[in-house]
């Protein structure tokens, strides 16, 4: 627990930037719910394409297993993989499994993020896209995690909230760049990326956690 707590503390110290709206919705010793929001100046279709097709471009590389050597992909289909592999494909991680896809509106993924997966915990992460007042798209990222653990999960909630705020901010900043507003890869590109990572997943699957600066975490 000491090692995990130190890693989470490091993430909290580095997570000084956050989403426009962030909140720990509820928390208990065995779980928590968090929510972050950003408004981006693009329509829902464009935001969706970037979400599923360009994850390797907007997800912060310092929250992956292998940093600049990592390649991320999302297969936007039920049972699809949110996967990571290094450049030669020998090191691989299944971060989450896609459970629900409503293009342009909702993407739901299942799994424990960061150290939570190694602790045997489960979670549901959801991206919801909706028209924003005044134009653009409001992207809401929520995550609910819990399960048995001898550790007090309430200590993790503010850290995970900060880290997910940074991850959503990565997507929002990507979509705010003029060159990316119309140039986001199509949803099909996300599928092909997922297929590429999926084809690299043979034999045993690498234990997944994403990393904080001192250990793999979100």
Image (cartoon, grey):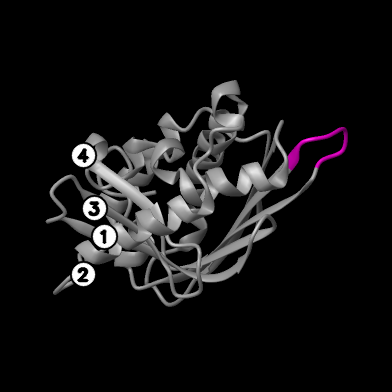
* Residue identified by numbered label 2: 205
Cα gap from disc 1 to disc 2, whole angstroms: 7 Å
The answer to whether the residue labelled 1 contacts the one labelled 2, judged by CB atoms less than 8 Å apart, is yes
Residue 191, given in percent of the width and then of the height, sits at 43, 59
Q: Is residue 215 above or below residue 100?
A: above
For the stretch drawn in magenta, what is the main secondary structure? loop
Give the residue pinned by disc 3: 85
Q: Could you tell me if the residues under marks 1 and 3 are in contact, i.e. CB atoms within 8 Å?
A: yes
Mark earlier in primary sequence (1, 3): 3
Question: Which residue is at a point 52% across and 58% down the rendered structure image?
Answer: 154
User: What label sits on residue 93 in the rendered view?
Assistant: 1
Earlier sequence position, callout 3 versus callout 2? 3
Q: CA distance from mark 4 to mark 2?
A: 18 Å
Among numbered discs 3 and 4, the one appearing first in the sequence: 4
Left or right: where 194 falls relative to 214 = right
Q: Is residue 54 left or right of residue 165?
A: left
Disc on the earlier residue, 4 or 1:
4
State the image quarter where residue 21 is shown: top right
197 left or right, relative to 59 = left
Q: Foreground mark, 1 or 3? A: 3
């Amino acid at each position: 627990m000491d090692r995990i707590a130190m890693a989470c503390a490091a993430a909290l110290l580095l997570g000084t930037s956050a989403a426009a709206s962030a909140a720990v919705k509820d928390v208990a010793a065995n779980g928590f719910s968090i929510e972050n929001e950003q408004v981006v100046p693009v329509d829902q279709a464009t935001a969706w394409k970037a979400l599923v097709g360009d994850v390797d471009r907007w997800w912060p590389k310092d929250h992956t297993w292998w940093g600049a050597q990592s390649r991320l992909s999302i297969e936007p289909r039920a049972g699809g993989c949110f996967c990571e592999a290094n450049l030669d494909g020998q090191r691989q991680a299944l971060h989450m499994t896609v459970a629900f896809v409503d293009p342009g509106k909702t993407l739901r993924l299942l799994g424990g993020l960061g150290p939570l997966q190694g602790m045997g915990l489960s979670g549901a992460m959801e991206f919801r896209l909706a028209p924003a007042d005044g134009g653009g798209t409001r992207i809401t990222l929520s995550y609910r995690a819990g399960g048995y653990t001898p550790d007090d999960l309430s200590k993790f909630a503010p850290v995970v909230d900060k880290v997910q705020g940074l991850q959503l901010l990565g997507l929002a900043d990507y979509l705010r760049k003029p060159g990316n507003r119309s140039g986001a890869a199509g949803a099909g590109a996300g599928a092909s990326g997922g297929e590429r990572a999926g084809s690299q997943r043979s034999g045993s699957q690498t234990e997944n956690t994403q990393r904080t600066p001192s250990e793999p975490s979100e």
